[in-house]
Image (spheres, helix red, strand yellow):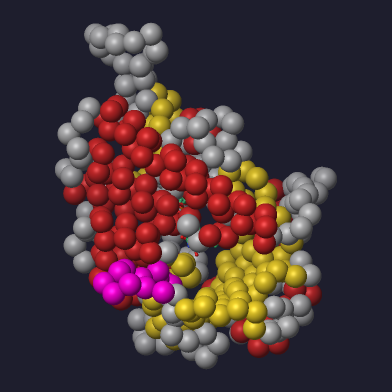
């Protein structure tokens, strides 16, 4: 469920293993909108470990290795500049358009695997067939999983994987305690044709001050050979309680008051970005979940461990999940044992990512706890 980076990679891997896979997606097709991604080395290694034909080469060709991290203050003064060290033969951390990653993954799917316009409303797990031996006192949940879609459609399968992102419909039914924590920022991200602001894999951070934080990085060349640059702007503000108001605010351009706090060249770069190349969202993470698996339902990606972007681990973690889950399902073990092994492998890793991301976000993030506006 969900054709983001985690769902696409997992579907491609399971399809190659010979499983009958349906990748159900709410949108009519894979949503390639978005921006730039820093895919850290372990994310690029996960792409390599997938061993899907041509995938690694395509992703590497679409991005540019990080060469240098530069920290400035909001006046534009240099605070720190450090090269991104890499051993010979090591895969790089990559600055790459999200669109390129998703298109490369989607190209791996066989026709018919992706089912668009399929929005999940709810799911439930059947009890095992009556003839199944009772192995323990715990009720086994090994029957098929039934899905109900928004258009009234019903699906049934042996395994449901929730790869449906931050606002997952799969995860809360698996763990009702899962809830979103607002981290305190409205965030805009854009991609603009520019080859002068950042060059050759540079990644600039503008340290947080006066209620804003920004980053900018080189995205290499697009298919037409034009240089691209990604930027992100985080503005501290309360989250409106009203959902409609939240949505309305995400349709707004970056406020001039926020741009006025930035160095003039950075503000000019943001103003020069076509509105259709800007995306906005509210920043959330979730607390570490106690489980990634329940019976024949498993979680991968943001559905399992949405985290702040402070460590740039989100997409990487989902790609690692997909490779791990596919490897365990291919091991020949009973599916229940394979899912348990997946959870045992991934839970400590993703909890570590979540804890580090949140603590860096709290250390370098807004000073006061975020508030939710009263309706
Ligand atoms: C500001 C910001 C900056 C970031 N920067 C980085 C970075 O530099 N590096 C990095 O690694 N990560 C970064 N991330 C995180 C990264 O973008 C996510 O972790 C990653 O995209 C999650 O992938 P996913 O496949 O789990 O979920 P998603 O990409 O969210 O995909 C979920 C899919 O499920 C579909 N879906 C949702 N609900 C339903 C439903 N009910 N029925 C059917 N389909 C449904 C959605 O339409 C979507 O296609 C950043 C995130 C933010 C917010």
Judge from the rendering whether residue 284 lies leftward or rightward of residue 294; answer left or right: right
Which of these two is toward me, 44 or 27?
44
Residue 89 lies in magenta, yes or no?
yes
Residue 85 in percent (x, y) is at 41, 74
Rendered image quadrant of residue 257:
bottom right
| 81 lies above or below 346 | below
Most frequent secondary structure within the magenta stretch: loop
Residue beneath the point at 62% across and 52% down: 359
Stretch of the chain drawn in magenta: 85-96
Q: Is residue 357 visible?
A: yes
Pick the residue in front: 151 or 55: 55
Q: Residue extending furthest right?
A: 374
The residue shown at (67%, 49%) is: 182
Q: Quadrant of the N terminus?
A: top left
Q: Position of residue 156 (x, y in %)?
A: 33, 30
Q: Position of residue 124 (x, y in %)?
A: 43, 25
Task: Give the quarter of the image for residue 341.
Answer: top left
Please state if 223 lies on the left or on the right of 260 as rendered: left
Comparing 207 with 278, the one in front is 207
Q: Nearer the viewer, residue 183 or 130?
A: 183
Whether residue 151 is visible, yes or no, is no
| Left/right of residue 97 with respect to residue 45 in the rendered view | right
Q: Is residue 9 above or below residue 131?
A: below
Position of the C terminus, as image quadrant, is top right
Whether residue 8 is in magenta: the answer is no
Number of labelled discs? 0
In the rendered structure, the answer to whether residue 32 lies left or right of residue 74 reads: left
Q: In the image, what residue occupies the spot 39% across and 13% down?
A: 139
Instruction: Tell me where residue 91 appears, x and y as whole percent.
Output: 31, 68
């Amino acid at each position: 469920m969900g054709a983001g980076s985690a769902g696409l990679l997992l579907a491609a891997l399971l399809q190659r293993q010979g499983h009958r896979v349906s990748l159900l997606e709410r949108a009519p097709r894979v949503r390639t909108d978005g921006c730039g991604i820093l895919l850290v080395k372990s994310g690029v290694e996960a792409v390599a470990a997938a061993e899907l034909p041509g995938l690694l080469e395509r992703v590497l060709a679409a991005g540019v290795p990080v060469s240098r991290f530069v920290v400035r203050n909001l006046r534009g003064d240099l605070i720190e500049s450090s090269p991104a060290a890499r051993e010979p033969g090591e895969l790089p951390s990559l600055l790459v358009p999200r669109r390129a990653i998703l298109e490369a993954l989607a190209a791996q799917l066989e026709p018919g695997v992706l089912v668009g316009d399929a929005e999940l409303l709810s799911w439930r797990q059947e009890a095992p067939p009556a003839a199944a031996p009772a192995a323990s006192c715990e009720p086994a949940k090994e029957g098929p999983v039934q899905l109900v879609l928004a258009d009234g459609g019903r699906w049934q399968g042996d395994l449901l994987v929730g790869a449906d992102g931050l606002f997952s419909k799969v995860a809360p039914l698996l763990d009702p305690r899962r809830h979103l924590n607002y981290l305190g920022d409205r965030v805009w991200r854009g991609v603009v044709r520019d080859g002068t602001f950042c060059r050759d894999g540079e990644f600039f951070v503008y340290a947080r001050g006066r209620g804003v934080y920004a980053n900018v990085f080189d995205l290499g060349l697009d298919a037409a050979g034009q240089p691209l640059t990604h930027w992100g702007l985080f503005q501290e503000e309360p989250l409106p309680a009203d959902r409609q108001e939240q949505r309305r605010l995400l349709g707004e351009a970056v406020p001039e008051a926020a741009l006025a706090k930035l160095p003039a060249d950075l503000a000019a770069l943001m103003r020069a970005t076509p509105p259709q190349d800007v995306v906005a969202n509210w920043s959330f993470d979730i607390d570490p979940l106690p489980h990634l698996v329940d019976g024949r339902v498993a979680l991968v990606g943001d559905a399992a461990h949405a985290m702040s972007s402070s460590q740039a681990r989100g997409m990487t973690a989902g790609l690692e999940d997909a490779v791990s889950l596919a490897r365990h399902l291919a091991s020949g073990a009973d599916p229940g044992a394979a899912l348990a092994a997946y959870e045992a492998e991934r839970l400590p890793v993703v909890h570590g990512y979540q804890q580090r991301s949140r603590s860096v976000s709290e250390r370098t993030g807004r000073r006061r706890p975020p508030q939710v506006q009263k309706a």
